[in-house]
Image (cartoon, rainbow, N blue to C red):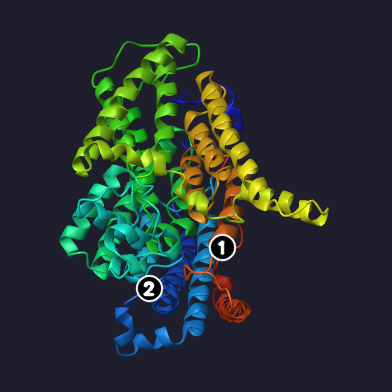
Amino acid sequence: MVPGETRSDVACRDADPTAPTTALDAKERRQLDVIRRFGTIGSLLLAVGSLGAGAAPVFNPVFQLPVLGLFTRMPTVALAIAFTGMFMIVLGWLALGRLAWPGRERLISLPQLARTLVMWTAPLVVAVPMFSRDVYSYLAQSEIAARGFDPYAVGPSQALGNDDDLTRGVPTMWRDTPSPYGPLFIAVGKVINYLTGAHVVWGVALHRVLALIGLALIVWALPRLARRFGVEPVSALWLGAANPLVLFHLVVGVHNEALAIGLMLVGFELALRRMPRIDPDGPFPPWQRGELLHYALGAAVITCGAAVKVPAALALGFLGVMIARRLGGRWRQLLGAAAGLAVIFLVVLAAAALASGLGRHGFGWVGTLNTASTIKSWMAPMTSLGFAAGGLGIVLGLGNHIDATIAVSRVIGAVLGPAIAAKLLLDSFRWRLRPLIGLGVGLGAVLLFGATVQPWYLLWAALPLAAAAGNTRFRTAATLVSVALAVALPPTGNTFDGHTFVLPYTYGAALIVVALGLLLVYRYLPSKPGAIRTP
């Protein structure tokens, strides 16, 4: 058994990933070339569309550039181009999945998939930020700390002033809110602002480099974790790192989830490198050379991820479960592992707080974690439930109590999500569940039942599950959800209040262009997942 495997895992697995596979044949390599080019054209179109449909800075330097500046004057055309690119990337990813589906007799190799990911990512590196304006908040909040203020006590408007270029890039609703991000991210942001002189464009560029570093960490960790947990590595990399949500929201959207999730996964892999393979009933061998060091190193790296965004801290709980199981699986050993990991967590967080220059204020972010709750998002199930209950009250003549019903439903979600995560920790401790699966589902539960849900939040659950859950039903469901969320959010990073009529035109134009493109390449695409190998 591999570390973390339960008694029923072998029976549940669709195909043995250690069974021999062969390389793609000549026909499939030609299909791969077509898929690569199709997706790369989609990335190029998305990058071009970002010039007029992206979340550009207030002082947009593209506006004065010859030729390229035309797209800023044609936002509807630019939006149609961006949608075309999005649809092509999603379709290219689905076609690529047919060559990476677990159980195929001939599979795309890890280097082939990695080169495809590089081709699709390269045009997006120079794209204007899209889908969100969060990167401008990163710049402003880091500058607050650089100027000696506490970013966990004041917002950009109070600390920098409303006329500051960095403040003007922040959406109005966030200008008075403190930072919800950890001290390590603030410290790195201060370095970026120092290197760029608080220049908005260069600051965005360096934050994108940070996101690419996070993506590289994800690419490094996913196949290794998948191999460790008995899942096809190339399939995990396809569902995880090559996912359109990763390309759209981590690379183009420049979200710090890239760095946080990357550190979390790398830390989990490092911690398990010296863990011996054991059965639920033992035997439990003595400490291996370097084993404790790897546990400490992995826990420190996971804590660094939590010092960027706090959800990564849940990985320490499941790592503690695995350490306790490795030692014999008793409650005494679980408490000992939890105590050791807690010490590492506090030491690393204290170091991050000192590095950020905030000192004792470096722990103030704990009180700002609910900042996003000021948004009432329909994507959040508990918020939608509150809207529905309040709307029902209006229909029944009970008055408008929507705010109250939303508050009540969010309290229920705040209890339900952690309760599910705690149950998953207990099941993992009792060998009923793979800990990495528990981590993915637990993160999904905490975030799904939270006050606000965004499409990129899914990645907290999807990436660990891509490396640990190998059954076909999960991968099919994850694929469908990824596709739906990938196209759910327009690329502008803004609402369409007052001009929603633009969306049908842009969606329609994009679908027509994509349909014509599919007619050209359809006969070159793989028509089915391919022959399934037998273990």
* SS state under label 2: loop
Q: Quadrant of residue 411?
A: top right
The residue carrying mark 2 is 56
The residue carrying mark 1 is 526
C-beta proximity under 8 Å, tags 2 and 1: no
Dot 2 or dot 1: first in sequence order is: 2
Is residue 266 visible to the viewer in this orientation of the structure? no
Q: Nearer the viewer, residue 151 or 95?
A: 151
Q: Is 447 placed left or right of 116 in the picture?
A: right
Question: Residue 176: image x %, image y %?
Answer: 39, 57
Above or below, 522 relative to 364 = below
Instruction: Please state, as top left, top right, bottom left or bottom right, where the C terminus lies in the image.
Output: top right
Residue occupying the point 40% across, 84% down = 72
Q: Residues within 10 Å of mark 2 (few under 14, many from 20)?
A: many
Residue occupying the point 41% across, 64% down = 133
Q: Amino acid at mark 1?
A: Pro
Question: Residue 445: image x %, image y %?
Answer: 56, 39
Q: Amino acid at mark 2?
A: Ala
Front of the two marks 2 and 1? 2
Marks 2/1: CA–CA distance: 38 Å
